[in-house]
Amino acid sequence: MFSVPQSSKSEFLDKARQAREERKGLKEKEKSAIHIQALVRSFLCRCRLQKEIRKEVDDYFQVSETGTSKRNALSIFKIARKLLFIYRQEDKMRFEKLCRAILSSMEVENEPKVWYVSLALSKDLTIAWLKQIKDVLWTCCSLLKNLKPDILQDNKLVTLYLTMLVTFTDTSTWRIVRGKGRLYDIYIYLIQILLTNGLARSKPSLSKGTLTAVFTLSLRPVIAAHFSDNLLRSFLLHIMSVPAVVYHLSVLTPECMATIQTHDLLRKFILFLSREEQCLDICVCLEGSHTLCLLGNLIHLGYLNEKVLEEEANHFVKDLTDMLSYCQRYVSQKKSNLTHWHPVLGWFSQTVDYGLNESMPLVTKQLQNLWGVSIIRTLFNDVLSKKLESQEPTPPPPQPSTSQNNLPVKNLFKRAFQKSASVRNILKPVGGKRVDSAEVQKVCSICVLYQTALSTLTQIRLQILTGLTHLDDLLPKLWAFICELGPQGGLKLFMECLNNDTDESKQLLAMLMLFCDCSRHLITILDDIEVYEEQTSFKIEELITISSFLNTFVYKMIWDGILENAKGEKLELFHSVHGWLMVLYERDCRRRFTPDDHWLRKDLKPSLLFQELEKGKKRAQLLLQYIPHVIPHKNRVLLFRNIVTKEKENLGLVETSSASPHVTHITIRRSRMLEDGYDQLRRLPVNSIKGVIRVKFVNDLGVDEAGIDQDGVFKEFLEEIIKKVFNPALNLFKTTSGNERLYPSPTSYIHENHLQLFEFVGKMLGKAVYEGIVVDVPFASFFLSQVLGHHHSTFYSSIDELPSLDSEFYKNLTSIKRYDGDVGDLGLTLSYDEDVMGQLVCHELIPGGKTMPVTNENKISYIHLMAHFRMHTQIKEQTAAFIRGFRSIINPEWLHMFSTPEVQRLVSGDNAEIDLDDLKKHTVYYGGFHSSHRVIIWLWDILSSDFNAEERAMFLKFVTSCSRPPLLGFAYLKPPFSIRCVEVSDDQDTGDTLGSVLRGFFTIRKKEPGGRLPTSSTCFNLLKLPNYSKKSILRDKLRYAISMNTGFELS
């Protein structure tokens, strides 16, 4: 009866628990409310306190500004403590006023109690004052970080905060800002930002005073720490890597540069960086672009401190080489599909910030000191100080009297002779200098430095080469140095280096590579007068020696299999040596300076080479690709003919036992030969043009001409077509002044379809070369160079080819180059005025060129632009069309084995004397004539004894239409040279009969042929010779016939 139900008990317990939780919740709410109230009261209290302090600060500065009370140091200290206690971003203006108040207190005279710094002497306030000044200066640094010196208001603040820093951080009191751990690193980083913002631009925004203050601030701790490694590292990282900081210091604040010299900072930098791990650490921290900036500043310091540079040359060279090598590796590592353009290093994936990009011209200007005369003379002192042995001057060798060789006038020879008053012995390999000597090692390391600069600073490579070639005596003396290396000197040593992989070998090869790069650049920019007459830098005999050395070196690299496996530096070396070799070879092709057979390799058997080419051997292919000139010309022509024959076989253009080639038949009216040939051949596929083409001529009466074309009629058609299109009267081609060589006419556009005509002409000339038909078409060498694609070469110079167009114009242009006065006085502009069919037309060499005067600064550009315009721009479209047609028949790779003059010989035959024995050996006789016939004996005797070389050439042209013999001899003349005995005139000639042959053989005449002249059929290379009774009659009639050119009839 007294027991409590179970459900009531659980309900009671639940209610009790809920009551406890409610009481607990109420207590927590009360506690939270109290906490929130405390926070709010605290916040409100702080706001009220901050407001009161700010009001107090404002009132203090307001009262001070009115001048009603004088501020003493203690009052400034107290107000500063309060301001620093509540300092926020909104208090910048108040902090500025505080700084001004502190600085003004320092300017009061004879009142120590007013000086803010006087509190440092108070025992009670010293520690508090030191803490306060640290906070003040730290705040100055923080604010400097975000200021932009180019904004006027910010510039004033920069000056204010820097003045604070300078005033309270001298050497004796620097300890006051120690104690914040790595404070200097952070502090100097802030100064770096300020310097970069103020200097990394085309025009600096920092004033002289500001820059002096910043630099003084950055240098003080380094001096105070006695140039410890840590502080030197920070200084190099943050100050010396600011773009062109040394340049701005030298221009704006010479006092700072004096400080640098006083403390011998350059030497300390050089020695610090000479430790490899420290140099790498600096480079890794700076990365690519800023390493380049540090490099520029160090080079500039070296330029300004020649004595230190001379004493520490080895370390300086090593430091720069290591830094450049790092930049090179960095750029190669950073290359990607998403690359950015760097004005000095080229393409790599690190973005270049705007300020750095803007200051890069000044950094480049600093780098240029490395290849300036001063540093080159200092570094290459061991090479340049040696005098080259002298000998009695000898007059320049006489040149062949061609129009191009007659460019210099008489006094030029005189001037060249006078310039050679200190003529030296010809430099040849002699050997005798140990390669492990200190002198050789030093020169090698310097060469490695410049070679590294060339491969790293890719966008200013030409500037470096130009600087290195500026001194006329550097390259000859470097060649003399190379000649002295090793036991024998020269080639053997460098071939041994190729097979060794030691650092010493690499350095020696780097020296050779630098020598080749610089010499190639020099020879490329020198004109013919400077090379041949004045003999600037190198004597002609030395160029012969050097070219022989280069030729052998490249040949051995290829033939010994070194090139096949070459990578990296060895491959670069090959291209460097080969590049200069080809520059010398091409100049020799243009104007000969080497002896006969100079370029040939006597130890190379052409038969062995051709066997290896057949087997596909790599070294034979590389030899043909890079130095085909070591193979005799006739062997290369034979190879060319073999290549053509193989292609014909592959295309099915050669008659075989199982198949006959497709024949294309065309009908040509004699009166419209060019028009009909153009209409019928231009639409033919290329393979049809390469194949057999049979021609049927129609005379003026519309009647088919008699004659069976077995290549002979087509040969006549081709010769006639070529004769017509290359006739200057047609105005498709013009002749050069002087030697009358052909090139496309700039005014060929008067023909409606002139470009299609040029393409057709290119095909026809290609067909002639393809079939081995020689045609008497003398091309201007500059035009042939373009056909061969030489103008795309890095080393091609338009000005060198200009004499082949107009030697007088070339003289006039080079006289501008040598003009000693102000070129501006000549009144020239960057334009070319030309008389085009009676109208004066002005061509601008560059956009807006007619308003740009030619000055001493741009005269070299003007000369090259003018040469390029005359030889390329004016005939660009015509040349492109001609090349397109020519290359559709002749694969351009086939012609790579020939030089420009050799291609001319390929087109027009050999310019050598006619070999009568060879002609006699390969002559075919008809109509009763034979080799022992008296008329034939007389003929050969007249040609050899009575005719001169010119008349023999006229005789050959009379019979074959070309005055030059085939390149491979008369065995390759198609159809073969033939002589036929004729009894009647050509219009009555019905061919050989049994009677006519017997009469010719036995010298039986129907009647005396004394009144008739010899005639010819050039399409068959056939001489039709009457059976004369006397040798004198034969001589006179033949001489008359060839002088009147009475040939060209069709049998």
Image: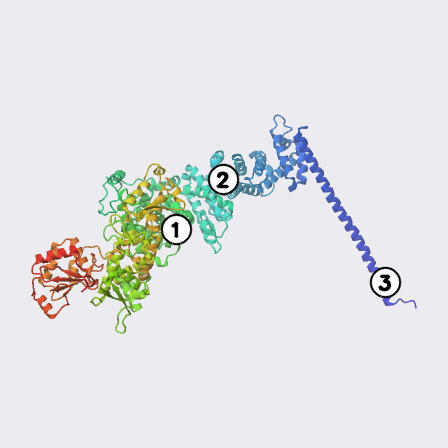
Looking at the image, tell me whether mark 1 or mark 2 is earlier in sequence order.
2
Q: Which residue is mark 2?
A: 203
Image position of 649 with respect to 965: above or below: below
Residue in view at x 33 percent, y 37 percent? 820
Amino acid carrying label 2: it is: Lys
Task: Mark 2 vs mark 3: give the one in front.
Answer: 2
Q: Position of residue 62 (x, y in %)?
A: 67, 32
Can you give x and y, in whole percent of width and height, for residue 902 in the image?
Answer: 26, 55
Q: Residue 70: give x, y in percent of width and height.
A: 66, 28
Horizontal placement of 269 versus 473: left or right? Answer: right
Instruction: Report the amino acid beneath label 3.
Output: Phe
Q: Nearer the viewer, residue 819 or 793?
A: 819
Q: Is residue 439 left or right of residue 226?
A: left
Going by the image, does 259 lie left or right of 950? right
Mark 1: amino acid:
Asp
* Residue 503, numbered label: 1
- Residue 696 visible (yes or no): yes
Identity of the residue furthest to the right in this view: 1
Above or below residue 593? Residue 667 is below
Circle number at residue 848: none
* Neighbourhood count class around disc 1 (C-alpha, 10 Å): few under 14, some 14–19, many 20 upward: few
Q: CA distance from mark 1 to mark 2?
A: 44 Å
Judged from the image, the secondary structure of the residue bearing numbered disc 3 is: helix
Label 1, secondary structure: give it: helix
Q: Which residue is mark 3?
A: 12
Distance Cα–Cα, label 3 vs label 1 = 97 Å
Image height of 390 relative to 499, above or below? above
Image quarter where the C terminus lies is bottom left
